[in-house]
Image (spheres, rainbow, N blue to C red):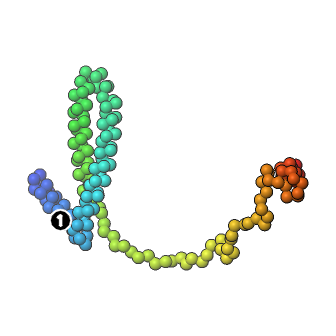
Amino acid sequence: MPGYAQKELKHLLKERAVKAYEAKEAEFPEAEQLREVERVVLLKVIDARWMDHIDDMDQLRQGIGLQAYGQRDPLVEYKMMGYDMFGEMTNMIAETTLRTLFRIRVEQKVEREEVAKVTGTNKDDSAVRAPKKRETKKIYPNDPCPCGSGKKYKQCCGRKQTA
């Protein structure tokens, strides 16, 4: 590429980028699908970069007081650095979005065939389990004793079982 002027080189690179993106558009069955991908990628990149920018601005705010030691006005320095950081963020959004869009590939859904056969498990489902039921009625501590003594169960036969 020797012998190109700066404007010619920029123009050549821009043409190649446009051709590469047109080739990427041709990979998609419908143009609207690519537009939807562009929107999703752009929103995700903006969201991520904006969150990073907010964190960076918070760190800048916490450390800006040190600028006073260098005989600089912290407010002026905060504004200037914040402006530079915002410009850097917008450039990073554009760069990351383009890089992601150029790297996206269209994949066809592949129907997978079942490789492993289900042979069974170690559970024995052959016997249907039902809840166990009492053969006799439950006797509560304050019920009359079934032996017929006339006392409460807890004072008669129930005392024998707990002791």
Disc 1 is placed on an element classified as helix
Q: Which residue lies furthest to the front in this view?
A: 150
Comparing 153 with 92, the one in front is 153
- Residue 75's image quarter? top left
Residue at the disc numbered 1:
19
**Is 49 placed above or below 137 here?**
above
**Is 26 placed above or below 60 here?**
below
**Is 120 placed above or below 162 here?**
below
Residue at screen point 44% across, 76% down: 112
Mark 1 residue type: Lys
Residue at screen point 26% across, 67% down: 33
Within-10-Å neighbours for mark 1: few <14, some 14–19, many 20+: few
Please indicate, yes or no, whether residue 103 appears anywhere in the rendered image. Answer: yes
- Residue 2's image quarter? bottom left
Residue at screen point 33% across, 35% down: 58
> Residue 161 location, x and y as percent?
86, 53
- Residue 154 vs residue 57: left or right? right
> Residue 18 location, x and y as percent?
17, 62
Please indicate, yes or no, whether residue 122 appears anywhere in the rendered image. Answer: no
Comparing 3 with 157, the one in front is 157
Figure label count: 1
- Residue 135's image quarter? bottom right
> Residue 32 location, x and y as percent?
23, 67
> Residue 1 location, x and y as percent?
15, 58
